[in-house]
Amino acid sequence: MEKIVIIWAQDPDGSVFKAVMDALKNKREEMADVVGPATSVLRIGELEIYHEYRRVLMAGREVRLNHGEYAMLYCMASAPGQVFSKAQLYAAAWGEEYLHGTTSVENIIWRLRQKLEQDPRHPAYIKTVIGAGYRLQISTEKEKRK
Protein backbone atom coordinates (compact mmCIF):
# COMPACT_ATOMS: atom_id res chain seq x y z
CA MET A 1 0.00 0.00 0.00
CA GLU A 2 1.35 3.42 -0.98
CA LYS A 3 0.93 6.48 1.19
CA ILE A 4 0.73 10.08 0.16
CA VAL A 5 1.65 12.78 2.62
CA ILE A 6 0.79 16.40 1.98
CA ILE A 7 2.68 19.03 3.93
CA TRP A 8 1.31 22.53 4.51
CA ALA A 9 3.87 24.54 6.41
CA GLN A 10 5.27 28.03 6.69
CA ASP A 11 8.50 27.87 4.71
CA PRO A 12 9.93 31.39 4.44
CA ASP A 13 13.40 30.31 3.32
CA GLY A 14 12.39 27.29 1.18
CA SER A 15 14.25 24.76 3.37
CA VAL A 16 11.23 22.48 3.88
CA PHE A 17 10.55 22.39 0.14
CA LYS A 18 14.23 21.59 -0.56
CA ALA A 19 14.23 18.77 2.01
CA VAL A 20 11.10 17.20 0.47
CA MET A 21 12.55 17.47 -3.04
CA ASP A 22 15.85 15.93 -1.88
CA ALA A 23 13.93 13.04 -0.28
CA LEU A 24 12.01 12.42 -3.51
CA LYS A 25 15.02 12.81 -5.82
CA ASN A 26 15.72 9.09 -6.29
CA LYS A 27 12.09 7.94 -6.17
CA ARG A 28 9.90 6.98 -9.09
CA GLU A 29 9.16 9.80 -11.52
CA GLU A 30 5.44 9.87 -10.88
CA MET A 31 6.15 10.61 -7.22
CA ALA A 32 8.59 13.40 -7.99
CA ASP A 33 6.15 15.49 -10.01
CA VAL A 34 6.03 18.27 -7.44
CA VAL A 35 5.42 21.94 -8.15
CA GLY A 36 7.77 24.38 -6.43
CA PRO A 37 6.65 27.22 -4.23
CA ALA A 38 5.16 30.18 -6.10
CA THR A 39 5.82 32.66 -3.33
CA SER A 40 7.61 35.77 -4.46
CA VAL A 41 9.97 37.16 -1.85
CA LEU A 42 11.51 40.61 -1.86
CA ARG A 43 14.75 40.79 0.15
CA ILE A 44 16.55 44.02 0.93
CA GLY A 45 19.20 43.67 3.61
CA GLU A 46 17.50 42.06 6.60
CA LEU A 47 14.05 43.00 5.32
CA GLU A 48 11.99 40.20 3.75
CA ILE A 49 8.54 40.66 2.23
CA TYR A 50 6.42 37.62 1.35
CA HIS A 51 3.82 39.31 -0.82
CA GLU A 52 1.58 36.26 -1.34
CA TYR A 53 1.09 36.04 2.44
CA ARG A 54 1.40 39.80 3.18
CA ARG A 55 4.11 38.83 5.65
CA VAL A 56 7.06 41.03 6.58
CA LEU A 57 10.17 39.94 8.49
CA MET A 58 12.95 42.18 9.74
CA ALA A 59 16.07 40.35 10.87
CA GLY A 60 14.01 37.16 11.12
CA ARG A 61 11.27 38.61 13.33
CA GLU A 62 7.75 39.13 12.06
CA VAL A 63 6.56 42.73 11.79
CA ARG A 64 2.83 43.40 11.85
CA LEU A 65 1.73 46.13 9.44
CA ASN A 66 -1.64 47.64 8.68
CA HIS A 67 -2.91 48.01 5.11
CA GLY A 68 -1.40 51.44 4.44
CA GLU A 69 1.96 50.55 5.97
CA TYR A 70 2.20 47.32 3.99
CA ALA A 71 1.10 48.91 0.70
CA MET A 72 3.65 51.73 0.93
CA LEU A 73 6.47 49.41 2.01
CA TYR A 74 5.70 46.94 -0.78
CA CYS A 75 5.53 49.77 -3.31
CA MET A 76 9.01 51.00 -2.33
CA ALA A 77 10.45 47.48 -2.02
CA SER A 78 9.25 46.61 -5.52
CA ALA A 79 11.70 49.20 -6.90
CA PRO A 80 14.45 49.68 -4.29
CA GLY A 81 16.43 52.86 -4.73
CA GLN A 82 13.67 54.55 -6.73
CA VAL A 83 12.27 57.75 -5.24
CA PHE A 84 8.50 57.73 -4.70
CA SER A 85 6.57 60.96 -4.23
CA LYS A 86 3.97 61.33 -1.50
CA ALA A 87 1.30 61.20 -4.21
CA GLN A 88 2.64 57.87 -5.54
CA LEU A 89 2.77 56.31 -2.07
CA TYR A 90 -0.69 57.63 -1.20
CA ALA A 91 -2.09 56.13 -4.42
CA ALA A 92 -0.34 52.81 -3.70
CA ALA A 93 -1.99 52.64 -0.28
CA TRP A 94 -5.47 53.93 -1.03
CA GLY A 95 -5.84 53.99 -4.82
CA GLU A 96 -6.92 57.63 -4.67
CA GLU A 97 -5.46 60.97 -5.64
CA TYR A 98 -3.19 62.49 -3.00
CA LEU A 99 -4.80 65.25 -0.94
CA HIS A 100 -2.19 67.98 -0.50
CA GLY A 101 -1.95 69.17 3.06
CA THR A 102 -2.62 65.75 4.57
CA THR A 103 0.09 64.10 6.67
CA SER A 104 -1.06 60.52 6.04
CA VAL A 105 2.07 59.54 4.12
CA GLU A 106 4.44 61.12 6.66
CA ASN A 107 2.61 59.37 9.51
CA ILE A 108 2.85 55.98 7.82
CA ILE A 109 6.54 56.47 7.00
CA TRP A 110 7.12 57.40 10.66
CA ARG A 111 5.30 54.23 11.83
CA LEU A 112 7.22 52.06 9.33
CA ARG A 113 10.49 53.46 10.66
CA GLN A 114 9.39 52.75 14.24
CA LYS A 115 8.62 49.14 13.31
CA LEU A 116 11.52 48.38 10.95
CA GLU A 117 14.51 50.53 11.85
CA GLN A 118 16.97 49.95 14.69
CA ASP A 119 17.29 53.72 15.06
CA PRO A 120 14.19 55.38 13.56
CA ARG A 121 15.76 58.86 13.88
CA HIS A 122 18.64 57.74 11.64
CA PRO A 123 16.94 55.27 9.28
CA ALA A 124 19.02 52.77 7.33
CA TYR A 125 16.17 51.55 5.11
CA ILE A 126 13.51 54.20 4.51
CA LYS A 127 15.26 57.38 3.39
CA THR A 128 13.77 60.83 2.88
CA VAL A 129 14.74 62.53 -0.37
CA ILE A 130 14.16 66.21 0.42
CA GLY A 131 11.76 67.84 -2.01
CA ALA A 132 11.08 64.56 -3.83
CA GLY A 133 9.71 61.87 -1.50
CA TYR A 134 10.98 58.61 -0.05
CA ARG A 135 12.99 55.61 -1.18
CA LEU A 136 13.95 52.25 0.20
CA GLN A 137 17.73 52.11 0.55
CA ILE A 138 19.25 49.30 -1.52
CA SER A 139 22.16 48.60 0.83
CA THR A 140 22.36 49.44 4.49
CA GLU A 141 25.39 50.84 6.32
CA LYS A 142 25.76 47.45 8.01
CA GLU A 143 26.18 45.74 4.61
CA LYS A 144 28.73 48.35 3.46
CA ARG A 145 31.01 47.50 6.41
CA LYS A 146 31.14 43.79 5.48
Image: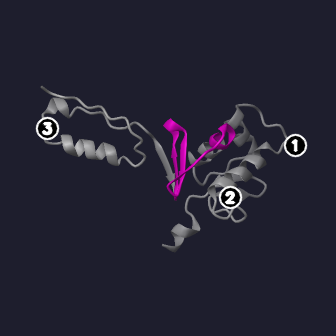
**Disc 1, SS:** loop
Type of amino acid under label 2: Lys
Which image quadrant: the N terminus? Answer: top left
Secondary structure of the residue carrying tag 2 is strand
> Closer to the N terminus: mark 1 or mark 3?
3
Residue 37: percent from the left, percent from the top?
37, 38
Residue at left offset 52%, top offset 67%: 143
**SS for dot 3:** loop
**Amino acid identity at mark 3:** Lys
- For the residues carrying marks 1 and 3, which lies nearer the camera in this image? 3
Residue lying at the far front in this picture: please name it.
1
Residue type, mark 1 in image: Gly
Q: Which residue has dot 2 on it?
A: 127
| Disc 3 to disc 2, C-alpha distance | 50 Å
Residue pictured at 52% horizontal, 58% vertical: 59
Q: Is residue 143 left or right of residue 134?
A: left
In the displayed structure, would residue 126 be above or below residue 105? below
Residue in the picture at 83% in, 37% down = 99
Q: Earlier in the sequence, mark 3 or mark 2?
A: 3
Residue that label 1 marks: 101
Q: Residues within 10 Å of mark 2 (few under 14, many from 20)?
A: some
Farthest residue toward the bottom? 145
Give how far apart the Cα atoms at labels 1 and 2 are. 21 Å
Q: Quadrant of residue 4?
A: top left
Question: What range of the chain is rendered magenta?
Answer: 46-71
Q: Mark 3 highlights which residue?
A: 27
